[in-house]
Image: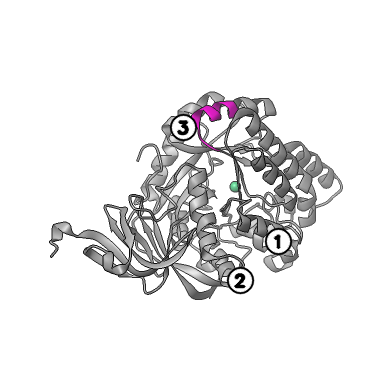
Amino acid sequence: MSTEADMVDLVIANGILVTPDGMAPGAVAIDGGRILAIGTDDAMPQARRVIDAGGHHVIPGAIDVHVHFREPGFSHKETWASATAAAAIGGVTTVLDMPNTNPPTATAQAVTQKIALASSQALIDFGVYGYLGEDNIADLAPMARAGASAFKLYLGSDNPLVPCPNDGAVLDAMAEIAKLGLRLTVHAENTGILRWREARLRAAGRDDLEAHLEQHADIATVEAVSRIALFSEWTGCKVHIAHESCRHSLPLIADAKRRGVDLTAETCPHYLLLSTDDAERVGGNALRVKPPVRGAGHAGPLFDALSSGLIDMISTDHAPYLPDEKRQASIWRTAPGFPGVETSMRLMLTQVAQGRIGLPDYVRMACEAPARAFGLYPRKGSLLPGTDADIVLIDMAATSTIKAAELHSIGNVTPFEGMATTGAAVMTLVRGHVVMDAGRIVGEPGWGRPLAGRG
Ligand SMILES: [Zn+2]
């Protein structure tokens, strides 16, 4: 007989538990925000609340290590409240936010301020990136102490808020980051090539989506991936290749891993599922993103690399813009990027439904691999006893169509408009607390906590 005091907070019963190793019918017991036990339904302790998973799959919450949630500075595009609602709907329970806000996250004070701002609004847990620039190498250690989860290097930047540092500064900074033990995520493109080509294309009067692709030539990213792998090998700084878009980078990533370089890589649904053949359908220039969605012939090899684990994980590069910013006649004035946290899981589960990957593969690339790469495993990204009860129930039979108007991001223009999906998150729990139920937000802003730092 159990008394109230013996009871645990919650049991999720009658589910199919999914880990990278496989799937099995089972249940999860949760107490104090942590997973207490996993096992069969009849092995579960008495609980104050029982959620019947109804035979749905139970997975760890997805971790998106590449998002732009826009605050401080760009609240007209997105807020921490809108973005984390979108994430919760999309089955994402932890994000790492990029530093190209205003002010940029380039000092300990800026890290502390962003953590405080996000803590007041977030529904899900989050970490923040610190920016690596020429002028703030002395700020790297203070940023880490203030709670930065990782650092971001913009090779190939034309954003004056987060300019591309010279290679000398990059090497010094990487030596410093190696000592701090954090990972450096890199936008790997060659700034010189991008600048030169943009000037040449503009001078020739080019102003179309194809010009954007010519500017961001394959070699511009292949060279930067090669250089950053070499710098990583030389300095011992752990690196992460952001938004891999190009099949020609894959042999370099494979070679670096073979040499023992601590290098991980991500790609995004738009590189896996779209090509320039989709431009007309998505409204031409609206397909603009950096690096670009390339011609047919890249998506297949990228998908294979993600399936095999050569590309470690799926992220989104969630970067919302308003319709006016996305629908410009000039490619050079068209904002690059689109939202992703709300649609990524649906898009990838659709690939599961089509038999291209297994559900355990998805859990590896969306949950476990990002947690491992960024020092969060097993606290995040697992279903192991003792870890945070960040859990998502998914319905593999749920079919729907992606519509921008139904997304929770403020800037909601999506290249996946009208795409049919199979499989979706139907419940999201963050540290044992239900924040999304049947497509509705039921959590409270401010429930989300920083991975490190004040909060
Ligand atoms: Zn980005």
Instruction: State whether residue 103 appears in this view.
Output: no
Label tally: 3
Q: Where is residue 123 in the image (x, y as percent from the top left)?
A: 39, 54
Q: Mark 1 points at which residue?
A: 300
Depth check: give the residue in front, 219 or 164. Answer: 219
Q: Decide if residue 428 is on the left or right side of residue 352.
A: left
Residue 413 location (% of width, % of height): 59, 61
Viewer-side label of 2, 3: 3
Quickly name the residue at label 3.
144
Residue picked out by circle 2:
419
- Between the residue at mark 3 and the residue at mark 1, the CA separation in whole angstroms equals 38 Å
Q: Which of marks 3 and 1 is nearer the N terminus?
A: 3
Q: In this rendering, which labeled residue sits more in front, label 3 or label 1?
A: 1
Colour mapping: one colour
Which residue corresponds to the image point at 62% horizontal and 51% vertical from the top-left?
A: 311
Q: In this view, does 263 lie above or below 269?
A: above
In the picture provided, is 271 more to the left or to the right than 66? right
Image quarter where the N terminus lies is bottom left
Which amino acid type is marked by label 3? Ala
Name the image quarter holding residue 383: bottom left
Q: Which amino acid, mark 1? A: Gly
- Cα–Cα span, label 2 and label 1: 19 Å
Q: Residue 154 colored magenta? A: no
Kindly identify which numbered label has been placed on residue 354: none
In the image, the segment drawn in magenta is 174-183
Choose mark 2 or mark 1, whichever is in front. Answer: 1
Q: Is residue 177 magenta?
A: yes
Q: What element carries label 3?
A: helix
Question: Which badge, 2 or 1, comes first in the chain's sequence?
Answer: 1
**Residue positioned 74% across, 44% down in the render:** 222
